[in-house]
Amino acid sequence: MREDNADGTERQPEDPRVRFAAERTVLAWMRTGLALMGFGFVVARFGLFLREIATAGHGAAHQRSTGWSLWIGTGLIALGVIVKPCKKSCVRLGK
């Protein structure tokens, strides 16, 4: 069965290797995201361990926070939300 594009030219069948490559890329990003979340969990637990050591050795632990991590994280999430639709439209347009 022949399929035509909107301009009347014949459309080539999609190569399955393209779809498999895209699926591997998505899976790699998911794996990377899970690894980063696991690393964040380890860092948080290590911070708890350091506070416990400080409390056991010197009394009350001194904890100082500037609050920058909240704003940096929020900014990165906002940037991701803005960039993601641009990437989809650029791929769709063939750029």
Image (cartoon, rainbow, N blue to C red):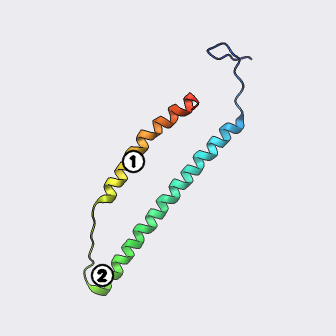
- Secondary element under disc 2, as helix, strand or loop, is helix
- The residue that mark 2 highlights is 55
- Secondary element under disc 1, as helix, strand or loop, is helix
Of residues 89 and 29, the one nearer the viewer is 89
Task: Please tell me which residue is depicted at 59% across the width and 51% down the height of the picture.
Answer: 28
**Residue that lies at the very extreme toward the bottom in this rendered image:** 57
Query: Dot 2: few (<14), some (14–19), or many (≥20) neighbours within 10 Å?
Result: few
Q: Quadrant of the N terminus?
A: top right
User: Mark 1: which amino acid?
Assistant: Ile
Label placed on residue 77: 1
User: Mark 2: which amino acid?
Assistant: Thr
In the image, residue 43 above or below residue 24: below
Task: Please tell me which residue is depicted at 31% across the width and 59% down the height of the picture.
Answer: 68
Label whose residue precedes the other's in the sequence (1 or 2) = 2
**How far apart in space, not on screen, are marks 1 and 2 (Cα)?**
35 Å
Task: Please tell me which residue is depicted at 42% across the width and 72% down the height of the picture.
Answer: 46
Q: Residue 5, position in %: x, y?
A: 64, 17
Q: Residue 23, position in %: x, y?
A: 62, 43
In the image, residue 47 above or below residue 88: below
**Residue that lies at the very extreme toward the right in this rendered image:** 1
Q: Going by the image, does 86 lie left or right of 19?
A: left
Q: Nearer the viewer, mark 1 or mark 2?
A: 1
Residue 6 falls in image quadrant: top right
Q: Going by the image, does 5 lie left or right of 63?
A: right
Q: Are marks 1 and 2 in contact (CB under 8 Å)?
A: no
Q: Quadrant of the C terminus?
A: top right
